[in-house]
């Protein structure tokens, strides 16, 4: 079958059919454009890097707080150890054999389940480490925001 598209005859299999945009698609595009516009107007909505001098300068000038560091849950501290990670992986494989498939989203659920079964002393130790790490990260974050800007040429090479 042949069709005339602005000139020579072209097979219909090569004609690109453009489907009309549905109202749902138009609403998606409108929401995305609205989000991008609001994001460009509100600098606090953009995730800021406290190590970036321009971000820190803009935050100081505009009085906007940069996002603070979040504290890692204690079970993430516990699973950093290779033997603990191997234990969680082994449990994930056992669960996968029962269900017939490996669900990656269940890693955190399995990790939390195993972590809650640990002795209280081990959980408290991990919680204390998590709090200490968070305190250290917050001190570094505060220092990055409140310290004077570096003027040496090496710091400008980043």
Image: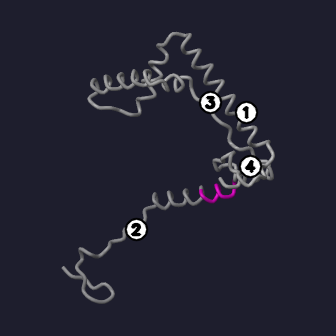
State the image coordinates of residue 15 (x, y, percent, origin top left): 29, 76
Say which of 65 and 133 sits in front.
133
Residue at horizontal 36 percent and vertical 71 percent from the top? 18
Residue drawn at (79%, 43%) of the image: 147
Residue indicated by mark 3: 71
Which secondary structure lies at badge 4?
Answer: helix
Q: Do the residues labelled 3 and 1 touch (CB within 8 Å)?
A: no
Could you give the CA–CA distance between mark 3 and mark 1, rounded to whole angstroms?
A: 13 Å
Q: Is residue 41 magenta?
A: yes
Which label sits on residue 20? 2
Q: How crowded is mark 4: few (under 14 residues within 10 Å), some or many (20 or more)?
A: many
Question: What is the chief secondary structure element of the magenta stretch?
Answer: helix
Q: For the residues marked 4 and 3, what is the alpha-carbon distance in whole angstroms?
A: 22 Å
Give the magenta part as a residue range.
Answer: 36-42
Q: What element carries label 2?
A: loop
Q: Alpha-carbon distance for marks 1 and 2?
A: 55 Å
Mark closer to the chain start, 3 or 2: 2
Q: In which quarter of the image is residue 141?
A: top right
Specify the quadrant that holds the N terminus: bottom left
Secondary-structure class at tag 3: loop
Q: Which of marks 4 and 3 is in front?
A: 4
Labels 1 and 4: the sequence-earlier one = 4
Residue picked out by circle 1: 139
Marks 1 and 2: which is nearer the front? 1
Question: What residue is drawn where x is 40% and y is 29%?
Answer: 106
Say whether residue 26 is left or right of residue 2.
right
Spot the residue most to the bottom.
7
């Amino acid at each position: 079958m042949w069709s005339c598209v602005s000139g020579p005859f072209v097979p219909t299999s090569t004609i690109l059919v453009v489907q009309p945009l549905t109202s749902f698609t138009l609403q998606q595009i409108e929401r995305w454009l609205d989000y991008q516009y609001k994001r460009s107007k509100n600098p606090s909505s953009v995730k800021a890097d406290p190590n970036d001098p321009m971000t820190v300068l803009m935050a100081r000038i505009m009085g906007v707080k940069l996002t603070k560091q979040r504290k890692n849950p204690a079970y993430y501290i516990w699973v950093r150890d290779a033997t603990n990670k191997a234990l969680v992986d082994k449990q994930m494989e056992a669960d996968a054999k029962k269900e017939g498939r490996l669900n990656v989203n269940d890693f955190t659920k399995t990790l939390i389940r195993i972590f809650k079964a640990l002795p209280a002393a081990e959980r408290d130790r991990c919680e204390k480490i998590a709090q200490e790490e968070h305190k250290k990260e917050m001190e570094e974050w505060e220092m990055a925001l409140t310290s004077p800007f570096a003027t040496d040429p090496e710091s400008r090479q980043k």
